Image: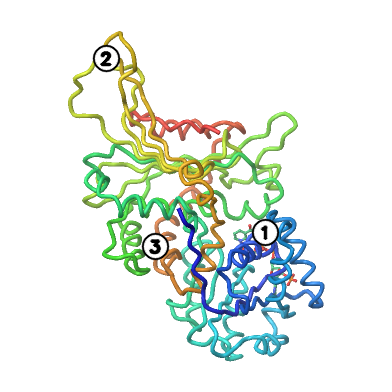
Amino acid sequence: MVSRVIPVAPFDLVLFGATGDLARRKIIPGLFHRFAVGQMPADARIIGAARSEMTHDAFLNLIRDSLEEFAPKAAAQPDKIAAFLQTLRYVCLDATGKAGWDDLGQHLRPETVRAFYLSVSPRLFGDIADNLNTQGLATPQARIVVEKPFGHDLASAKALNADLRRVFDEGQIYRIDHYLGKETVQNLMVLRFANALWEPLWNATHIDHVQITVAESLGVEGRGEYYDRSGAMRDMVQNHLMQLLCLTAMEPPSRFKPDAVRDEKLKVIEALDPVPPDNIARGQYRAVKGDGGYRDHAGDPQTRTESFVALKVNISNWRWAGTPFYLRTGKKLRARSSEIAITFRDPPHMIFPKMAGRRGNALIIRLQPDEGITLRTTIKEPGPGGMRLVEAALDLTFAEALGPHAEAQDAYERLVMDVIRGDQTLFMRGDEVEAAWTWVDPMINGWEESRESPAPYDPGSAGPEDALMLLHRDGRRWRDLAP
Ligand code: NAP
């Protein structure tokens, strides 16, 4: 299998927040990898911008250190690092002020694709957009890239959209959800829409239920105070789990074009039923000997923010009525594991003896660890002794099946190159984000009004008892959180 790298056109990328954590850990290493494989042209320009006073050399040293720390393979490519550093410049400016913007303008070439990547707090989005506008830098071929969180609720998401749209058209705005940059998530669309096998089965007639899990084994630790302002629902469900739900449930788009795909995702969100309190389970991990609980890390012994949430979700449309989607996400759980599990209904009539523990067919799409796809089937247990049935898995672990070509690109690498290519397919559209908040807000308002605390759960468990009951009472159970 030949891996093809198609170079992108020359570009100028302004990285606001270039000295920050996300830029140093993900964006710069991602750009370096694309440069090293020849996708990023040598005459591209990356212009870092932040308030810190820094010489050009000091900025290069910071970037060199970031590559050493966060792009371990870079060390073996000193020539590539040297050439990559040639593409970098640094401008000192305050997003909220007027100084430094002229200097920024000097680095931008008039005819070249330009992208403004806002790796800064969302409260700066409006100021940056306005400054770009007044300085005449927001040209029609410019793109603006923004990071999560995109709002805290519907009202703040609308305000952010308004801030950006004062200056940029929707076709220039790239809202990142890095889950959409993951190889397996894109493969979900290929699996569904490039194979004839699944479509006839992909509906409530054949699918019993769907489970979407994003479980983390780590707690909030040093990010406790930041996380406490959001919680699992805002931090994970409104964006990442919602995107996974949409891609699993959407109708086939008429073509693989940004708005055709995003129209279908939006229709899924609009078809989601409101979720009653009985179908929501919230949790907070507790302290165990010597290990602080969520409340210790959040720095507020009374906090009611959830570190775990599970939902039973119904989609009111022809394809899915009667097939629940169960979503769960949380911190400090038994394993770090993200997957979409599609469980098919049992055969209408079983001609073989009943098999204890038989769990029927399921298609598991694993995002982490070991990206891949597994189809759980039933086979005859080999050997004499009658028709004994056993479960067997048809397993496609990408790393094994595809060898070195399976080496997953980091989601950011893919997404930044899509921005330069001008492809918005894997970015959230403004109406999609607002629809997601419209669905999520009443749940959050409901539990805030009730002032109920989330149920405590043990670190290393599968979450609170209430979450297990969500499925038990329907005669189902969650898949094990296997490490
Ligand atoms: P961070 O480490 O605090 O970095 C913020 C950056 O913004 C710094 O470079 C800072 O540099 C710059 N900055 C702050 N105020 C500024 C101003 N007034 N004008 C110009 N530059 C300013 O934050 P981060 O973790 O990188 O996160 C950046 C954004 O990405 C946030 O919205 C965050 O929610 C989002 N995000 C982060 C992650 C992550 O893993 N870190 C993941 C997903 C999303 P100076 O202080 O020198 O100005």
What is the number of the mark on residue 200? none
Residue under label 3, please give it: 435
Q: Which of the two residues, 78 or 67, is positioned nearer the viewer here?
A: 78
| Residue lying at 72% horizontally and 57% vertically, measured from the top left | 76
- Ligand 1 - quadrant of the structure image: bottom right
Would residue 278 be visible to someone looking at this image?
A: no
Question: In which quadrant is the C terminus drawn?
Answer: top right
Residue 84 percent coordinates (x, y): 68, 70
Residues at marks 2 and 3, CA–CA distance in whole angstroms:
51 Å
What is the number of the mark on residue 25? 1
Q: Does the residue labelled 1 lie within 8 Å of ligand 1?
A: yes
- What is the tally of numbered marks visible in this picture? 3
Secondary element at image label 3 = helix
Q: Is mark 2 within 8 Å of ligand 1?
A: no
Secondary element at image label 2 = loop
- Amino acid type, callout 2: Met
Q: Say which of marks 3 and 1 sits in front.
A: 1
Q: Which of the two residues, 32 or 54, is positioned nearer the viewer here?
A: 32
What is the number of the mark on residue 387? 2
Q: Tell me, what colour scheme is on the image?
A: rainbow
